[in-house]
């Protein structure tokens, strides 16, 4: 896949709350950023999981991520895996000294819809899904839960890519 993520979202609305039709609960919907994720009910989960301590060796390798990498995160604030993995991922970025602007966050409802944001081409079946791209081309995904540790899976995606600087 190429060219499916855009990062010029200046005019977009962020951190919108809706009542999820599937669950009847108030959830984040559409484009979100860290500010929205640390507030409200999801913010409670964020605080509990952000205390995660990533593997230092993996963090060292992640620090070397080339500047042309981007991550699209599709998540559900209603989803237990998103509640666990997303704050941990932010902790990994913070510990590695990587600006979270590298990541575009899209929150979906229980039907995996984000309203006017078209996601069908991303093939999202489970959330969270972290989609790693380089120069607009997908190079790897972490879907729902990591295979090993979140930071190890992150590192393995960027190391396996040719010319990744590793």
Image (cartoon, helix red, strand yellow):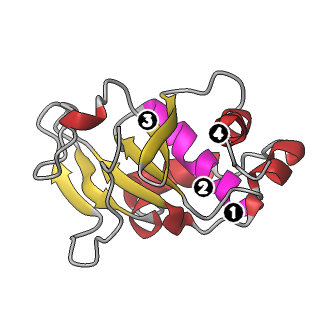
Label ID, residue 90: 2
- Residue carrying label 1: 94
Q: Secondary structure at mark 4?
A: loop
Foreground of the two, 124 or 51: 124
Does the magenta segment cover residue 161?
Answer: no
Task: Give the label, 2 or 3, closer to the camera.
Answer: 3
Q: Secondary structure at mark 3?
A: strand
Q: CA distance from mark 4 to mark 2?
A: 22 Å
Q: Earlier in the sequence, mark 3 or mark 1?
A: 1
- Residue carrying label 3: 129
Task: Give the label, 4 or 1, closer to the camera.
Answer: 4
Residue 5, percent from left and from top: 33, 53
Q: Residue at x 71, y 34 (%)?
A: 156
Q: Residue at the bottom extreme?
A: 10
Residue 153 lies left or right of residue 30; in this view the side is: right
Q: Residue at x 45, y 40 (%)?
A: 138
Task: Give the label, 4 or 2, closer to the camera.
Answer: 4
Contact check, label 2 and label 1, Cβ < 8 Å: yes
Q: Residue at x 23, y 62 (%)?
A: 16
Label ID, residue 161: 4
Classed neighbour count for the residue bearing mark 1: other residues with Cα under 10 Å, few (<14), some (14–19), many (≥20): some
Q: CA distance from mark 3 to mark 1?
A: 19 Å
Which contiguous range is marked in magenta? 80-95
Contact check, label 4 and label 1, Cβ < 8 Å: no
Q: Residue at x 78, y 44 (%)?
A: 54
- The kind of secondary structure the magenta stretch mainly shows is helix
């Amino acid at each position: 896949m190429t060219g499916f993520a855009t990062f010029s979202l200046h005019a977009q609305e962020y951190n919108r709350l809706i009542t999820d039709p599937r669950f009847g609960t108030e959830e984040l919907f559409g484009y979100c950023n860290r500010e929205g994720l640390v507030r409200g009910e999801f913010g409670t989960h964020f605080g509990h999981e952000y205390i995660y301590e990533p593997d230092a060796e993996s963090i060292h390798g992640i620090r070397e991520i080339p500047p042309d990498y981007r991550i699209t995160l599709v998540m559900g604030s209603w989803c237990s895996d998103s509640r666990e993995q997303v704050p941990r991922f932010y902790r990994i970025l913070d510990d590695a000294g990587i600006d979270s602007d590298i990541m575009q966050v899209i929150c979906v409802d229980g039907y995996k819809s984000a309203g006017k944001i078209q996601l069908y081409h991303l093939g999202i079946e489970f959330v969270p899904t972290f989609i790693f791209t380089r120069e607009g081309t997908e190079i790897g995904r972490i879907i729902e839960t990591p295979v090993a540790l979140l930071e190890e899976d992150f590192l393995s995606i960027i190391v396996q890519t040719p010319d990744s600087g590793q």
